[in-house]
Image: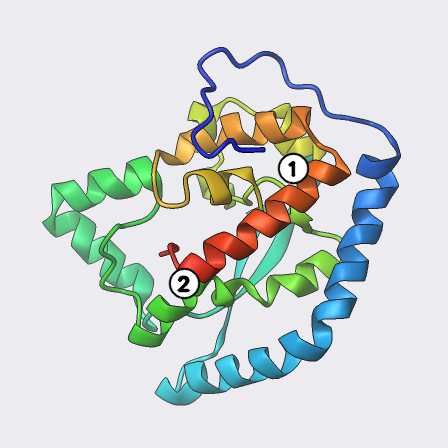
Amino acid sequence: MTVPYADFSDVTPVYVPTGFYSNIGKRLLDIALVVISLPVVVPLLVLILGITALDGGKPLYVQRRIGRGGREFLCWKVRTMVHDADRVLDDLMRRDPEVAHEWRERQKLSCDPRITAFGRLLRRTSLDELPQLWNVLNGTMSLVGPRPFTPDQRQIYAGGRDSAAYYALRPGLSGLWQISRRNAGSFAERVRYDEEYGRHLTLAFDLWILFSTVSVVLSATGI
């Protein structure tokens, strides 16, 4: 099964499954896999947070995201940027129109000076997202689903066109967009991947995405 650069030019209205797996099985899988991973994840996360805190800042970063049903929730990550990251970004966008355009288009920078050396390593391996396992446990996220966006990004997401798939599902720690495009494409393209995922939501598809995520993480292609 391969869909790394799927063609979404003829996207049809999304169909979100309503069977046993999407309503119950998916949640049971999330809880089981997270609990099984805790003996490895907890010591690793303690080490990562300790190293991150060496610069004197808070090691955890929390941000409001839009979740299932359009409800906001607190999304947890390991801090990967300098303390005054927002100010640095504002200054960069004022000085460089190309940076401003890239941020508006992708909501990220290919060469982001705000990211610390250790933070860059965490992002390349996606280890900065380990705290989101707590979000999976508390039910605000799933291991697989749409990539969560912030409230102020809602109008950018698909040009303001709400996706039925996004709001019908829990946002994911990983998902079809992450393993397919990773650093390529615009922010608004995510809606097409979310709708594609919603149409094909099954246990087999989720397991394939999880196995593909491991491959992507090991290849360290994130930023």
Residue linked to disc 1 = 70
Residue 52 located left or right of residue 213: left
Label 2 with label 1: CB-CB less than 8 Å? no
What residue sits 62% from the left and 31% below the top? 197
User: Which residue is most to the left?
Assistant: 95
Residue linked to disc 2 = 123
Q: Quadrant of the N terminus?
A: top right
Residue 87 located left or right of residue 172: left
Q: Amino acid at mark 1?
A: Gly
Quadrant of residue 7 within the rendered picture: top left
Residue 71: % across, % down: 67, 42
Quadrant of residue 146 within the rendered picture: top right
| Residue 170 shows in this picture | no
User: Viewer-nearest of labels 2 and 1?
Assistant: 2
| Residue 176 shows in this picture | yes
Residue 211: % across, % down: 61, 51
Residue 108: % across, % down: 33, 48
Q: Quick check: 119 above or below 220?
A: below
What residue sits 30% from the left and 72% below the top? 116
Q: Nearer the viewer, residue 42 or 64?
A: 42
Residue 158 located left or right of residue 183: right
What residue sits 66% from the left and 77% below the top? 40
Pick whichever of labels 2 and 1 is earlier in the sequence. 1
